[in-house]
Amino acid sequence: MKKEELEDVMVENPLQNKKIAICPIYREGGWLTKINKNHDGAFLFTGAKFGIKGVPYDASKRTYVDPLTDEEKKYFVQPEVGLGIKIEDLSIHKEKNFWSKFEVNLTRDPIVLDLNNPLDYLRYKFLLCQKDIISPTWGKRFEKGTYKFSIKDDEADQEEAIGNIDLEMEVMSYFNNIQNSIRKMSALLTMYYAKTNQAKRVPANATTSFLKTELHKLIKSNLKDIHDIISDPHLNERVLVTQAVESGAISKLSASEYQIVGEEDKLNLRELLEFLRNKKNQAIRAKIEAQLENQA
């Protein structure tokens, strides 16, 4: 980003010397694609437009989404930029503002935006805030069923790919350490089902081969969820609780209350995790772990 001086005040120039594309997202399974995957209407018919007008309303914050930062606004109202915009017109709180009339028409053909062009940059920021319609990166295009288009930025996509490689290496390192333990693999799979609100259960007679196959599928398709699970600082305690509840070593009294068999205290999950981690309680933890090993 560049700095430009206006009346002795330094204003940051947000424009970027690169181009990005807004591409349609094609999904399998539509009735037209079943007839012909290359059907003219599989996404939009030739010549049809998908118009997006005005910024979205954020119900949680009870205000419209603001596409620009304060620094960006200072830049775009400069006479030298040539857009003729007043600073008050960029306010999302003004009833009739710049954004309430702003519109971008998308089609089945990708459009290219030059981020060194002020209007194209504004189109880019406008589309970025359409969080239910536009995927921010190509790699995330299938994360929401409501996404219809995706921003394709080669630089950002490459950084995201590198980030995914790092995540995969961490997950695979953990997987390699537990792949010979049916108990630990079962716990990881059980925690995944719980995290993703699935009613599925790990079969009681699950084999090493079955567990390896299932976890490998999830690493390929749901890498982030698996990474979130193994990154939990209480992971080992959660694994222990998951298996101990199934074995009966810990009783789950309600959705939020647990009791270790033989102990008087009733604990919520957070308290139970801290209890098992506390050095003073390692004898009780060792007893639970021994019970699990004997049942394996």
Image (cartoon, rainbow, N blue to C red):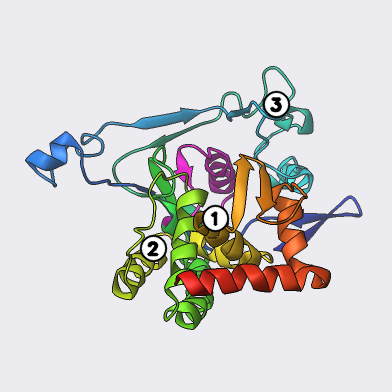
The answer to whether residue 162 of the structure is visible from this angle is no
Q: Residues within 10 Å of mark 1 (few under 14, many from 20)?
A: some
Q: What residue sits right under mark 2 in the picture?
A: 218
Query: In the picture, which quadrant includes the C terminus?
Result: bottom left
Q: What residue sits right under mark 3 in the picture?
A: 63
Q: Nearer the viewer, mark 2 or mark 1?
A: 1
Q: What residue sits right under mark 1 in the picture?
A: 248
Please, which residue is most extreme toward the left here?
35
Whether residues under marks 2 and 1 lie with C-beta atoms below 8 angstroms apart, the answer is: no
Residue under the image location 41 percent in, 51 percent down = 141
> Disc 3 on helix, strand or loop?
strand
- Looking at the image, tell me whether mark 1 or mark 3 is earlier in sequence order: 3
Q: Nearer the viewer, mark 1 or mark 3?
A: 1
- Of 2 and 262, nearer the camera is 262
Q: Pinpoint residue 256: horizontal percent, then vertical percent.
A: 66, 41
Q: CA distance from mark 1 to mark 3?
A: 50 Å
Whether residues under marks 1 and 3 lie with C-beta atoms below 8 angstroms apart, the answer is: no
Residue under the image location 69 percent in, 56 percent down = 262
Residue 139 against residue 49 in the figure, above or below: below
Residue 95 against residue 188 in the figure, above or below: above
As shown in the figure, which amino acid type bears the numbered disc 1?
Answer: Gly
Q: Pinpoint residue 202: horizontal percent, then vertical percent.
A: 38, 57
- Of 74 and 226, nearer the camera is 226
The answer to whether residue 268 of the structure is visible from this angle is yes
What's the mark number on residue 141?
A: none
Query: In the picture, which quadrant includes the N terminus?
Result: bottom right
As shown in the figure, which amino acid type bears the numbered disc 2?
Answer: Leu
Taking the image as shown, residue 218 lies to the left or right of residue 67, namely left
Q: Pinpoint residue 112: horizontal percent, then vertical percent.
A: 42, 52
User: Which portion, as a residue range, is magenta?
Assistant: 116-138
